[in-house]
Image (cartoon, grey):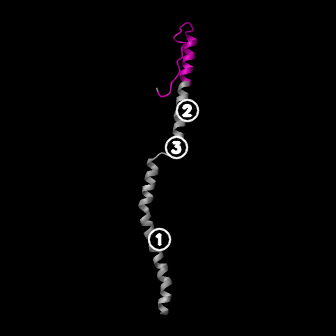
Amino acid sequence: MRKFSLLLPLLGLATSGCISTATTIVKAPFQVAGKAIDWTTTSQSESDRNYGRKMRKQEAREGRERKEAAKECRKHPDDQEACRYSGYRAGY
Protein backbone atom coordinates (compact mmCIF):
# COMPACT_ATOMS: atom_id res chain seq x y z
CA MET A 1 0.00 0.00 0.00
CA ARG A 2 2.86 2.34 0.74
CA LYS A 3 4.23 1.96 -2.79
CA PHE A 4 0.83 2.80 -4.22
CA SER A 5 0.57 6.00 -2.17
CA LEU A 6 3.95 7.14 -3.50
CA LEU A 7 3.05 6.25 -7.07
CA LEU A 8 -0.26 8.09 -7.09
CA PRO A 9 1.17 11.66 -7.08
CA LEU A 10 3.67 10.72 -9.74
CA LEU A 11 0.89 9.27 -11.86
CA GLY A 12 -1.08 12.51 -11.45
CA LEU A 13 1.88 14.59 -12.62
CA ALA A 14 2.52 12.31 -15.58
CA THR A 15 -1.07 12.44 -16.84
CA SER A 16 -1.47 16.20 -16.40
CA GLY A 17 0.62 16.79 -19.50
CA CYS A 18 -1.51 14.33 -21.45
CA ILE A 19 -4.71 16.02 -20.31
CA SER A 20 -3.33 19.43 -21.25
CA THR A 21 -2.37 18.17 -24.69
CA ALA A 22 -5.76 16.53 -25.15
CA THR A 23 -7.63 19.72 -24.29
CA THR A 24 -5.42 21.69 -26.69
CA ILE A 25 -6.20 19.20 -29.46
CA VAL A 26 -9.93 19.32 -28.72
CA LYS A 27 -10.03 23.14 -28.62
CA ALA A 28 -7.95 23.67 -31.78
CA PRO A 29 -10.73 23.20 -34.40
CA PHE A 30 -12.99 25.64 -32.57
CA GLN A 31 -10.23 28.23 -32.34
CA VAL A 32 -9.44 27.85 -36.05
CA ALA A 33 -13.13 28.20 -36.94
CA GLY A 34 -13.37 31.32 -34.77
CA LYS A 35 -10.39 32.90 -36.51
CA ALA A 36 -11.84 32.09 -39.93
CA ILE A 37 -15.14 33.73 -39.00
CA ASP A 38 -13.30 36.80 -37.70
CA TRP A 39 -11.38 37.09 -40.97
CA THR A 40 -14.47 36.74 -43.16
CA THR A 41 -16.81 39.10 -41.32
CA THR A 42 -16.57 42.86 -41.00
CA SER A 43 -16.91 44.39 -37.57
CA GLN A 44 -18.90 47.55 -36.96
CA SER A 45 -15.74 49.60 -36.41
CA GLU A 46 -14.27 48.35 -39.70
CA SER A 47 -17.52 49.15 -41.46
CA ASP A 48 -17.56 52.67 -39.99
CA ARG A 49 -13.94 53.23 -40.97
CA ASN A 50 -14.57 52.07 -44.54
CA TYR A 51 -17.68 54.27 -44.82
CA GLY A 52 -15.73 57.29 -43.54
CA ARG A 53 -13.00 56.66 -46.10
CA LYS A 54 -15.58 56.40 -48.88
CA MET A 55 -17.25 59.65 -47.84
CA ARG A 56 -13.92 61.52 -47.65
CA LYS A 57 -13.11 60.38 -51.20
CA GLN A 58 -16.51 61.55 -52.42
CA GLU A 59 -16.10 64.91 -50.71
CA ALA A 60 -12.65 65.32 -52.28
CA ARG A 61 -14.14 64.50 -55.70
CA GLU A 62 -16.90 67.06 -55.13
CA GLY A 63 -14.34 69.70 -54.16
CA ARG A 64 -12.34 69.06 -57.35
CA GLU A 65 -15.49 69.28 -59.47
CA ARG A 66 -16.59 72.48 -57.76
CA LYS A 67 -13.14 74.01 -58.28
CA GLU A 68 -13.19 73.01 -61.96
CA ALA A 69 -16.68 74.50 -62.39
CA ALA A 70 -15.57 77.80 -60.83
CA LYS A 71 -12.54 77.85 -63.13
CA GLU A 72 -14.75 77.30 -66.21
CA CYS A 73 -17.11 80.05 -65.05
CA ARG A 74 -14.20 82.48 -64.73
CA LYS A 75 -13.01 81.55 -68.24
CA HIS A 76 -16.45 82.05 -69.81
CA PRO A 77 -18.45 84.43 -67.60
CA ASP A 78 -21.06 85.13 -70.31
CA ASP A 79 -21.90 81.45 -70.80
CA GLN A 80 -24.73 80.63 -68.39
CA GLU A 81 -24.28 76.90 -68.92
CA ALA A 82 -20.62 77.07 -67.84
CA CYS A 83 -21.54 78.94 -64.65
CA ARG A 84 -24.27 76.51 -63.66
CA TYR A 85 -22.89 73.98 -61.23
CA SER A 86 -25.39 71.27 -60.40
CA GLY A 87 -23.09 69.73 -57.82
CA TYR A 88 -21.83 66.30 -57.15
CA ARG A 89 -24.41 63.83 -55.93
CA ALA A 90 -22.91 60.86 -54.12
CA GLY A 91 -24.19 57.47 -55.12
CA TYR A 92 -25.88 58.50 -58.35
Residue density around tag 1, few if under 14, some if 14–19, many if 20 or more, within 10 Å? few
Question: What residue lies at 56% left-to-right and 20% top-to-bottom?
Answer: 66
Looking at the image, is 58 positioned above or below residue 27? above
Q: Are marks 1 and 2 in contact (CB under 8 Å)?
A: no
Q: Are marks 1 and 3 in contact (CB under 8 Å)?
A: no
| Front in this rendered view, residue 70 or 48 | 48
- Distance between the alpha carbons at the discs numbered 1 and 2: 51 Å
Question: What residue lies at 56% left-to-right and 6% top-to-bottom?
Answer: 78
Three-letter residue code for mark 2:
Arg
| Image coordinates for residue 56, horizontal then vertical, percent | 55, 32
Q: List the residue tagged with mark 2.
A: 56
> Looking at the image, is mark 1 or mark 3 earlier in the sequence?
1
Looking at the image, is 89 positioned above or below residue 21? above
Q: Is residue 66 magenta?
A: yes
* Residue span colored magenta: 63-91
- Distance between the alpha carbons at the discs numbered 1 and 3: 36 Å
Residue 76, numbered label? none
Secondary structure category for the residue under label 3: helix
Secondary structure category for the residue under label 1: helix
Looking at the image, is 17 positioned above or below residue 57? below
| Image coordinates for residue 55, horizontal then vertical, percent | 53, 32
Q: Quadrant of residue 15?
A: bottom left
| Image coordinates for residue 49, horizontal then vertical, percent | 54, 40
Question: What residue lies at 55% left-to-right and 28% top-to-bottom?
Answer: 60
Q: List the residue tagged with mark 1.
A: 20
Q: List the residue tagged with mark 3.
A: 46
